[in-house]
Each structure stands twice: as structure tokens, then as C-alpha cells.
Amino acid sequence: MVLRIVVLILSAALVRSWGINHAHPGTGAKCERLNVSFCRGLRYNMTAMPNFMGNEDQRQAERGLATFMPLVHYNCSKHLRLFLCAVFAPVCSEHVTIPACKSLCLSVRRDCEPALTSLALPWPHLLDCNRFLDRGNTLCVQPPDETLDNISSPTLPTVQQQWPVMYERSPQISIRLQQQQQHYQCPPHFVQISEMEMIFCAPRCGTDAYYRAEDKKFAERWMTGWAWLCFLSTLFTLLTFWVEPSRFRYPERPIVFLALCYNLLAMAYIVRAAVGADNLSCVSQIDGPSYIPVSKQILPVNNAILYNSHLIVN
């Protein structure tokens, strides 16, 4: 939980340091097919680039969206996903870019600002609601079947008020969790996870939730290649020590211990590549497998061995 708060603080601080050059796409914005995985399933398949944030292509827009994933996982607003997509991957219809409505921004700010305020962080300047258009005669994106006029002041409890509740176990909390599950929706590649009396979204196994499939394959091959190189070189060092231990005297002998640690670490990566990441990192859920933080699950024996070996050698 502390790690989540730190990630949220760092992400919000990064957002504060960003600037925004214009509130609307430039005249050179063109319609193109939507490839941002986070925004799929929102009933539109065409977007405009450059977007409202000045991103030149969808890859840059996806990196910008990744900054807000802690807020998405926190589920502070059911309209947050729609709002972020309207900003980073705006709807494009017949070469007309449709921005987010100001009322939509205010609704998301009403729901999510308490989480930032409780951490002594202001609302990101990047998402200043005054930069967006009012409804009226202007075409803009607003939540379906929602009335966002006359938005009241924030009524959600602050983050500090919510932390103590997470450790309670009572029928009232179970009822509230059921209500939250009905209220919140995860993106298409995510699944709801109930943990420590809190609901958050976790990426499903086998989906490209954060990165493209080709990028993940390249990273896996890259790590596996270096793991084999590390394993063979450290194995050679260990065999040399086993054949003639007298060659390794202090202060050179600690090199053998370092070689042993890195040999075990490389072995864990090699086993992961041979067995498959899904077999080691995924657990069954009712609506499909999903990635779960290994430190908060009861691990099978094979998972525990690999996970603890990483902790020991590091």
C-alpha cells in the first residue's frame, strides 16, 4: 500500500512538471485508426494526432497515459478513463476533432482531487478544466446518460480516512465492496481484484495492457540472452574455484560469492524463459487469469523458489 502511495506521488509530481502548449489540436491534426489499447472499447475507433497534449503520435500519447495509471488503479472516478482518452486520444469524426467537455473534466476533478489533496498535491496543471470547452452549441465528449451540470464540491472521503477502513473486516465492508464492484469498471485489458478490503484493476495475462507484444518479446529475448551470458561466465568462475580453491585467497575470494549470487539470479531468468512468464506470474480468477503482485499472494512452491531467490541474491 505504501508503494502505491509513493507511485501516486511520483506520478503526480511528474504531471505537475509537464506543460501544455495548446488546448486543442493544431490545424495539422489528422484522423487515424485508434491503436491506444487503454482507450479501446469506448465506442469509437478513430482518433486525431497531434492531440490536445501536443503528442505527435499515439505512442507518445500512450506513454503520457501511463503516467496516470496509479489514478486509474485507484478508481477515484468512473469517468476517468473516458476523460483521459478524450484528452490523449480524442475522438475524430469526419476530420473533426471532438474535445472533452469542461463538465466532464470538473466531474473527474471532483472525484479524484481529494486523493491528491490528501497527499498535499494539487490538481495537475496539465488537466486544468479551464482549458476545456463548455457544452452549449459546441460538440464535445461527455459521459453517456449523465447530467454533469451544477457540479457540487467534493464529497468523497480523503485517502487518510480510507486507509484505516481497509483493515476492518465486517459485513458492512463486504457490502461496500460489492457496491464498488458494481460502480467501478476496469479497462478492457484489466480485471477487478479485491485485496485488503480494496478494489483495484490489474492487467490480464496474455494481453498488451501496458506495452506492445513486439516490445515485450524483444525485452524477454534481451534479458534471456544476457542471463545466459551471465550464467556461463559465472559458472566458469565457480568451476575454476572448485578445481583450484587456493587460487582465490582474500581479498579476491568474495568474487566467488558474487559469482554464485549472479549465477543463481541468471538461473531464475533462464527458468522463467523456459517455463513461461504466465505459468509463474498468473493465478486463476473467476473471469480469467490476471497478474497479481507476488508479495500479496500465497505462492505455489515453484513461484516461491524463484521469487525468494531474487530476494536473496539482491
Image (cartoon, rainbow, N blue to C red):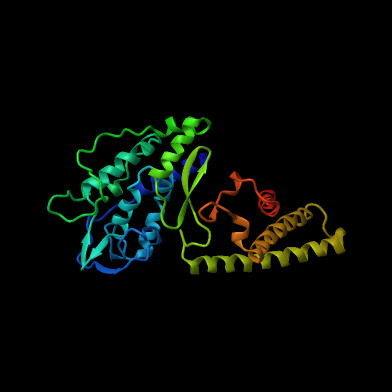
Residue at image point 25% right, 64% down:
92
Residue at image point 72% right, 55% down:
261
The answer to whether 27 appears left or right of 166 in the picture is: left
Residue at image point 60% right, 55% down:
281
Residue lying at the far left in this picture: please name it: 137
The answer to whether 130 appears left or right of 264 in the picture is: left
Along the line of sight, the residue nearer the viewer: 29 or 167? 167
Residue at image point 52% right, 62% down:
206
The x, y position of residue 45, in whole percent, is 31, 65
Whether residue 75 appears in this view of the structure is: no
The answer to whether 182 appears left or right of 153 in the picture is: right
The x, y position of residue 243, in whole percent, is 87, 64
The x, y position of residue 49, in whole percent, is 28, 65
Mark count = 0
Whether residue 272 appears in this view of the structure is: yes
The answer to whether 210 appears left or right of 109 in the picture is: right
The x, y position of residue 219, in whole percent, is 55, 65
Along the line of sight, the residue nearer the viewer: 119 or 280? 280
